[in-house]
Image (tube, grey):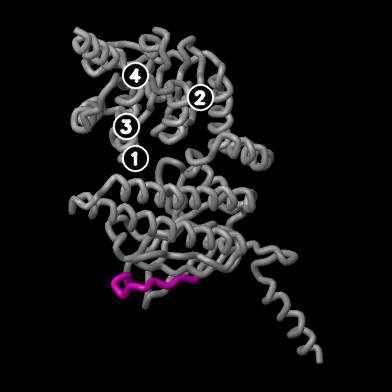
Amino acid sequence: MCMNRVYYWIVPLLLCAGCQGGVETSYVIDGHVNNADANGNIIYLSHSNGDELVNLDSAIVDDGLFSFRGEQEVPIMAYLRFNRSLDSLAVPVLFILENGSMEATMDTLFSTVTGTEQNEAFEAYRVEAHRLDSLRNRLHERYLEQVADSQMTAELESSMYGQYGRLDDEATDRAYRFIRKNRNSPAALWLLESMQSRFSEAQLEQLLSELGSRNKSAQVLTDIAQRLRSADKIEPGSPYVDVPLVDMWGRSTSLSGYVGYARYVVVGFWQAGSDPSCRAMVKLGELYREYGYRGAIFLSVSLDSDAELWREQVQASKLPAHQCIAANPDEVESRYALAAVPAFIIINPDGTINSRNLTLEQLGSKLQELLPYRMRRDTVSAKSDSLAKKKI
């Protein structure tokens, strides 16, 4: 009878091993690699310290299986990965390392980690994000094919841009909703850091208020707070901020050299190494041809660190109007609260900010509002001369 009593006490203790009061105090990751070539290779459990990946543990894949065990007091973002030279064995996977039981599936197309509540939520987001990325990649490939085959038309290009924009908006909206719903997860801060450039300032203010109380030391929140403080200084109606620039010939200049002259100034911030930026600058050139003579100065400001790359891109794209590169890109980004490029602002003739954070479409509409069509003086003169000759 005593033996039975001892047995009945041992069973609950075994079941609760690794937990205290129902709270997990250790983690177990059981994994499988869908690639026979992975057998005998080392898989790493790693964590990013901001500058590099630090290996927390490692395991050898045996018959397609591997496992990790340990304790993680505070949940962190971690990776399961092979050595970079062996990335072809399986796609690395980002997940939340926390106490509890997790299952990992490593695959050449898409790897997953599930099992705990936080990872289930993050995995659901990753699946949708992957789907949207795949759709955008296919759309981009189709675009390149149409261009290569000389089948691209203005109507088709506009349609493709619209599709891409809608997919991009959906991806941004899903990220925003995930962060708000999972604000206590380390994945929320990770996603905010990688997606902050896609959120509006109103959205960032909302996220800052919701995440700030629990994550006061998070660098991404400090950066966002600084960006919002800078944005307050360049709201419409505020004076523009002068920044040093360098022109195409290497001469020092500044934004103030283009402001005034009783004209609006359209400034486009971009980077030569970014395809979306380059396409946007070509479109900006079209707006310049339409509105430049109506009373607007167009200035493109590159935030590149490689001046030679910038000059080559300007020449290759035959960009019109004034072209400059920032003498200090970080200063420009900070002063104008730029989270991403391309970005556009309009400065009034009196040197105050008219509007900022404009898309190309919004920029076109705003210019139409500020500078309605009027006949060019040279056209008027030509018509007057023609009428005069007819009267003679």
User: Which quadrant holds residue 132?
Assistant: bottom left
In which quadrant will I find the N terminus? bottom right
Viewer can see residue 327: no
Q: Which residue matches tag 4?
A: 375
Give amino acid for label 3: Met
Residue found at x 43% / y 47%: 165
Q: Position of residue 88 (x, y in %)?
A: 29, 63
Q: Which residue matches tag 2?
A: 355
Magenta region, residue range: 30-40
Q: Which residue matches tag 3?
A: 281
Side of 142 relative to 230 (left or right): left
Gap between marks 1 and 4 measured at Cα: 33 Å
Viewer can see residue 231: yes
Gap between marks 3 and 4 measured at Cα: 26 Å
Comparing marks 3 and 4, which lies closer to the viewer? Answer: 4
Tags 1 and 4 in contact by the CB under 8 Å rule?
Answer: no
Furthest residue toward right: 1
Tags 2 and 4 in contact by the CB under 8 Å rule?
Answer: no
* Badge 2 element: strand
Gap between marks 1 and 3 measured at Cα: 9 Å
* Badge 1 element: helix
**For residue 276, which numbered disc appears in the image?**
1
Give amino acid for label 2: Ser
Gap between marks 2 and 3 measured at Cα: 18 Å
Side of 201 relative to 154 (left or right): right
Q: Position of residue 188 (x, y in %)?
A: 57, 49
Residue found at x 41% / y 52%: 163
- Work out whether 215 lies above or below 263: below
Give amino acid for label 4: Met
